[in-house]
Amino acid sequence: MNPEVNTILEQAQTVFNHKPAVENYTGLVHVGVDLGTAYTVLVVLDAEKRPLAGRYQFAQIVRDGLVVDFIGAIQLLKKMKAEVEADLGFPLEHAATTYPPGVPLAEVKATRNVLIGAGLECSQFVDEPTGANALLNISDGAVVDIGGGTTGVAIVENGKVVYTADEATGGTHFSLVVAGALDVPFIEAEKIKTDPAQARMVAALVHPVMQKVGSIVARHIKPFDVKTIYLVGGSSSMLDINEVISDMTGVKTVTPTHPMFVTPIGVAMVDQ
């Protein structure tokens, strides 16, 4: 993986939910929106496609790739858009967005309508693996998106996505295991799951779920000559998950820094 990918992701970490990277910016922008099962992300890149500003927030407005809270999604995206516009000092007019592989066309349109409802022209629709690879820029390998509700697997050959699959098991399942094991509410489990101080304990609790993710990946990559697996999505940042997947697949597994931002930054890169 190109080291430049991690540099861009580190830059994103410094501007998300903070002040823009450049004050009084007046150039061209590229905007991406990722309506995830666990987190909604809005990212703005500058003319050189470097992170300029952005917001992300936990919100359960999507389930298994389907928008289940249409009004809530619009309200949240409107709020995030207004905050970023206030930071930048100019309006955002368009954005590209993603959809999970295999989602019905009607649901893809629903995502587009969320953007329109929030005051954004939808410039591009791309599937999540294609969006992620706009940043990763890999020629061959497997992109595995461990999202809030599902694990998506995409095979890339010669720079093109040639196969996709999406199965239930993701961050929500990790949180449910933590909630049950510790007898705490789901929201509290989400906080525990993402607390670096408790990462070792959480990894031990959810190890069987990691193995389930590994078995999904192993099954879908089996027919292909995959030399490297690239993990993206928020749950990919969990301690030990790349080692578990590598052990179960026998394939080298790489996790970029801040993997939750890979797909939204990638989709922003295709915004015109």
Image: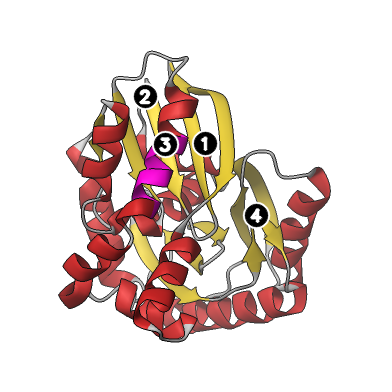
Residue type at the position of mark 3: Ser
18 left or right of 59 in image: left
Residue type at the position of mark 1: Thr
Nearer the observer: mark 1 or 2; the answer is: 2
Mark 1 residue element: helix
* Residue at the image point whose x is 64% and y is 56% from the top: 64
Q: How crowded is mark 4: few (under 14 residues within 10 Å), some or many (20 or more)?
A: many
Q: What stretch is highlighted in magenta?
A: 209-216
Residue under label 2:
141
Using the image, tell me which numbered label, if any, was put on residue 130. Answer: 1
Using the image, tell me which numbered label, if any, was put on residue 65. Answer: 4
Residue under label 3:
215
Q: Position of residue 232 (x, y in %)?
A: 38, 47
Mark earlier in primary sequence (2, 4):
4
Q: Are marks 2 and 4 in contact (CB under 8 Å)?
A: no
Q: Where is residue 235 in the image (x, y as percent from the top left)?
A: 37, 58
Quadrant of the frame with the N terminus: top left
Mark 2 residue element: strand
Q: Where is residue 44 in the image (x, y as percent from the top left)?
A: 45, 62
| Residue 21 seen in the current view | no
Nearer the observer: mark 3 or 2; the answer is: 3
- Report, in whole angstroms, how far the alpha carbon at label 1 lies from the one at label 2: 13 Å
Nearer the observer: mark 4 or 3; the answer is: 3
Mark earlier in primary sequence (4, 3):
4
Give the prevailing secondary structure in the magenta stretch. helix
- Report, in whole angstroms, how far the alpha carbon at label 4 lies from the one at label 3: 21 Å
Q: How crowded is mark 1: few (under 14 residues within 10 Å), some or many (20 or more)?
A: many
* Residue at the image point whose x is 63% and y is 59% from the top: 94
